[in-house]
Image (cartoon, helix red, strand yellow):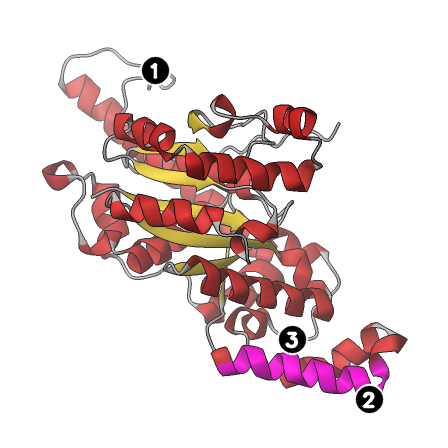
Amino acid sequence: MPFGQLVLGSPGSGKSTYCDGMHQFLGAIGRQSSVVNLDPANDHTNYPCALDIRDLVTLEEIMSDDRLGPNGGILYALEELENNMEWLEEGLKELGDDYILFDCPGQVELYTHHNSLRNIIYRLQKLGYRLVAVHLSDCICLTQPSLYIANILLALRAMLQMDLPHINVLTKIDKISTYDRLPFNLEYYTDVDDLSHLVPALENESPALRSEKFGKLNTAIANVIENFGLVRFEVLAVENKKSMMHILRVIDRAGGYVFGSAEGANDTIWQVAMRNESSIMDVQDIQERWIDMKEEYDKRELEEEEEQARIRGEKAKAAAEAAGIDVDDTAMDDVPAESKSYTPTVVRRKKP
């Protein structure tokens, strides 16, 4: 039974960067994975693309032939994919039981009210795929109360529309300490606590929001979110190993991967750890980790990784000498990949 992630989010939330980092991380822990690009506007991917919607249809062709704009063209492309599901199904068959990362377009219409993406996912579920929707939001939304509320509403609508196990993630959390200090602790925003506390902050954000009319609207929106009670957020720094370990464990539990044994008897030590260990990042820790003592944590984690790398190097050298193989400190090419120190290397495209 193949498992996978449906990576959603607004433009700029870090979907392609996440897919790139997660693909590297899965490879490091010994889990075979592939990335499928479902964004017809993404003409250059940093990750190795196993299957690309642009091989079926490109945004440039749609805009030229049908005289559509970028947003309409992307919606049309997903409708085209829905009508040619055989192409996607055949491509996925060649990937076998690989863990699949679906990199989706950033047009929010696709996962709020347009039906094509949902219909595509239903077809994949019928093929046996166990998918988790991973909805990404840039953590800069925390710095502006109205933007934070808007992201919660968007996440809630996506949860209702996609009808999948759903994980909401605040990305780029390693940047949050560089912004203006938040009026509440980080865990207030991740837990989506009593939003009535944000009403004064909303009123202070803009003079237009201080009227009685907007006050009632803000209260009504907060009540809607709290009555559903579905939204909470995880936090992620894609270049931080422990953060990636935490988010993958959460996703594995949501999708049922943690309860299975997809790789059979060939599980590496990393895979067993990912299945069985409890989460390493409690919500009480994130304020301290990413805001209050970020520099101290970064330094400590770097020292730990360097020490682990040194110990692994010494063990590998001792094992090689015991086997009668001459080695020096720099000859480590034969060390198994899963035993090396791992830090995701994310290459971000420069803006034109």
The residues tagged by marks 3 and 2 sit, at their Cα atoms, a distance apart of: 24 Å
Q: Nearer the viewer, mark 3 or mark 1?
A: 3
As rendered, which of 185 and 226 lies closer to the eye?
Answer: 226
Q: Nearer the viewer, mark 1 or mark 2?
A: 2
Inspect this view and state whether residue 16 appears.
Answer: yes
- Label 1–label 2 contact, CB within 8 A: no
* First-in-chain label (3 vs 2): 3
At 28% from the left and 33% from the top, the residue drawn is: 32
Quadrant in the picture for the C terminus: top right
At 38% from the left and 58% from the top, the residue drawn is: 164
Inspect this view and state whether residue 237 appears.
Answer: no
Work out whether 43 lies above or below 333.
Answer: below
Q: Amino acid at mark 1?
A: Ala
Say which residue label 2 marks: 212
Percent from the top left, x then y, of residue 178?
Answer: 71, 55
As rendered, which of 340 and 149 lies closer to the eye?
Answer: 149
Q: Amino acid at mark 2?
A: Glu
Task: Give the residues drawn in magenta, as a range.
Answer: 210-227
Q: Quadrant of residue 129?
A: top left
Say which residue label 1 marks: 331
Percent from the top left, x then y, of residue 12?
Answer: 65, 45
Q: Amino acid at mark 3?
A: Phe
- Label 3–label 1 contact, CB within 8 A: no
Q: Is 66 positioned to the left or the right of 9 in the image?
A: right
Q: Is 239 positioned to the left or the right of 62 in the image?
A: left
Mark 3 Cα-neighbour bin, 10 Å: few <14, some 14–19, many ≥20: few
Work out whether 150 lies above or below 4.
Answer: below
Q: Nearer the viewer, mark 3 or mark 2?
A: 2
Percent from the top left, x then y, of residue 176?
Answer: 65, 57
Q: Is 160 positioned to the left or the right of 341 in the image?
A: right
Say which residue label 3 marks: 184
